[in-house]
Amino acid sequence: NAGVTQTPKFQVLKTGQSMTLQCAQDMNHEYMSWYRQDPGMGLRLIHYSVGAGITDQGEVPNGYNVSRSTTEDFPLRLLSAAPSQTSVYFCASSYSRVRNEQYFGPGTRLTVT
Amino acid sequence: GQQVMQIPQYQHVQEGEDFTTYCNSSTTLSNIQWYKQRPGGHPVFLIQLVKSGEVKKQKRLTFQFGEAKKNSSLHITATQTTDVGTYFCAENPAYSGAGSYQLTFGKGTKLSVIP
């Protein structure tokens, strides 16, 4: 099992550009989430999905879109990048609502200039 | 929503010394998960505590859930350089069957070990 994979590892964007961060898992987990990590702020939830076709907002959803067309994939779209979106982005998956220990991907380090 | 406060924010210890990080809440926690993140890495799940007063051990790591389920601690005995990283606690409010799916993470304790 590859676990949770994310691409790209690093990305530099100019303000106003858009891009998609890719996330895939091969553990057949129903639940997937996107977090951003900023110094001193811990992990903050952006969006999550409880199954294919179902998504919901987390703590900091503004400026981001998600979709979940398959169990395996959960891409995160930045609509119009801003410097405030400079961060490290982690995708995570978990088995169920109760067995919710998170399996994190390796992360994408995004810089917006 | 529920907030979990972690202290200290940073801790520097000499190799061989013990280390403890605390996770506190003003309200009763459903459960507590602990994660470790190595520098430049991603968080890795360590353990979940669900019962009042629960104590679990993983080699030199001891995890404890308070009797009132309002606090938790992670204690490392005789730290090694491999223990370097940031330790996070998180609550899973959905564990009790109700509440949001969203985990609430503490801000973490960054541990440095001086060889």
Image (cartoon, coloured by chain):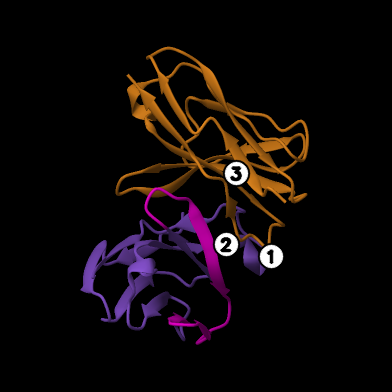
Chain colours: A orange, B purple
- Residue in the image at 45% along x and 59% along y: B2
Place of residue B17 in the rendered image (x, y in percent of width and height, measured from the top left): 26, 81
Find out whether the residues at labels 1 and 3 contact each other: C-beta distance under 8 Å: no
Q: Identify which amino acid the numbered label 2 is placed on.
A: Pro
Q: Secondary structure at mark 2?
A: helix
Residues in magenta, as a range: B38-65
- From the viewer's perspective, is residue B19 above or below residue B111? below
Q: Identify which amino acid the numbered label 3 is placed on.
A: Ser
Judge whether residue A100 is colored magenta.
Answer: no
Indicate left or right for A11 with B109 as reference. right
Find out whether the residues at labels 3 and 2 contact each other: C-beta distance under 8 Å: no
Q: Nearer the viewer, residue A10 or A23?
A: A10
- Residue in the image at 64% along x and 60% along y: A100
Q: How many marks?
A: 3
Q: Residue under circle 3?
A: A33
Question: How much space separates mark 3 and mark 2, taking CA atoms?
Answer: 16 Å
- The answer to which quarter of the image holds residue B107 is bottom left
In this rendering, does residue B31 appear at all? no
**Label 2 and label 1 in one chain:** yes
Judge whether residue B42 is colored magenta.
Answer: yes
Mark 1: few/some/many CA within 10 Å (<14, 14-19, 20+)? few
Q: Nearer the viewer, mark 1 or mark 3?
A: 3
Give residue A80's mark: none
Give residue B93's mark: 2
Q: Quadrant of the C terminus of chain A?
A: top left
**Label 3 and label 2 in one chain:** no
Q: Residue under circle 1?
A: B97
- From the viewer's perspective, is residue A100 above or below residue A75? below
Q: Nearer the viewer, residue B39 or B94?
A: B39
